[in-house]
Image: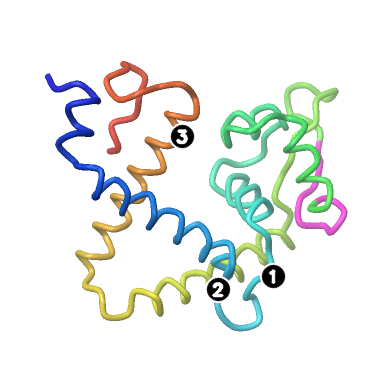
């Protein structure tokens, strides 16, 4: 089995340089547009809020610790990021159904409507940016980007390719 050094040599520094450059350009452009979408919803929700609301929508009500663990950030960051979402009525705090002393965060109806609006706007942006791509190209790009994000997340967690806990990208 080739080592990481062998694979790096096989790829060549030119390809790795091009890859890191394209990732940097993507990060800058994504931040500039905030991939906010089109129309009135464009740039109307920051990345942290979108990711928190999306997680609550996909996984349901949960506590701060579970939300933080699922997002790979610490609890204090989640607490700080969720406070304005609670203040604006997008998220509500409720008692845990099994332990009334514990608090869970839940997407409010207003938060669900806002998330749906932003998702629709962002979906339209993705449609426009990839207009001229085939369905297979869109699917391949999504698969590779998902794999890249999983590998980057694993690397940040100290896992490396070949580690039993490292994601395979599937």
Which quadrant holds the C terminus? top left
Pointer 3 residue: 153
Most distant residue in the front direction? 13
First of labels 2, 3 by sequence position: 2
**Of helix, strand and loop, which one carries label 1?**
loop
Q: Quadrant of residue 166?
A: top left
The answer to the question of whether label 1 and label 2 lie on touching residues, with beta carbons closer than 8 A, is yes
Q: Would residue 82 be found to the left or right of residue 119 on screen?
A: right
* Alpha carbons under labels 2 and 3: distance apart: 25 Å
Pointer 2 residue: 37
Q: As displayed, is residue 53 above or below residue 164?
A: below
Q: Position of residue 24 (x, y in %)?
A: 46, 55
For the image, the number of numbered tags is 3
Q: As displayed, is residue 35 above or below residue 93?
A: below
Tell us which disc is closer to us: 3 or 1: 3
Q: Quadrant of residue 61?
A: top right
First of labels 3, 1 by sequence position: 1
Pointer 1 residue: 44
Q: Position of residue 1 (x, y in %)?
A: 12, 19
> Camera-side residue: 163 or 83?
163
Identify the residue shown where x is 55% and y is 73%: 37
Q: As displayed, is residue 85 above or below residue 64?
A: below
87 in magenta? yes
131 in magenta? no
First of labels 1, 2 by sequence position: 2
State which region is magenta.
Answer: 86-94
Tell us which disc is closer to us: 2 or 3: 3
Q: Position of residue 75 (x, y in %)?
A: 73, 30
């Amino acid at each position: 089995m080739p080592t990481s050094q062998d694979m790096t040599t096989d790829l060549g520094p030119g390809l790795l340089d091009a890859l890191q450059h394209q990732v940097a350009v993507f990060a800058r452009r994504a931040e500039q547009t905030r991939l906010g979408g089109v129309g009135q919803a464009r740039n109307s929700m920051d990345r942290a809020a979108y990711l928190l609301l999306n997680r609550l929508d996909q996984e349901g009500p949960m506590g701060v610790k579970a939300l933080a663990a699922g997002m790979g950030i610490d609890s204090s960051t989640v607490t700080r990021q969720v406070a304005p979402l609670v203040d604006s009525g997008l998220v509500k705090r409720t008692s845990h159904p099994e332990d009334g002393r514990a608090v869970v965060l839940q997407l409010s109806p207003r938060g669900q409507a806002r998330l749906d609006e932003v998702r629709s706007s962002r979906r339209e942006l993705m449609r426009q940016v990839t207009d001229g791509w085939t369905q297979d190209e869109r699917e391949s790009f999504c698969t590779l980007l998902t794999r890249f994000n999983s590998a980057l997340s694993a690397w940040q967690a100290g896992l490396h390719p070949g580690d039993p806990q490292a994601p395979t990208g599937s």
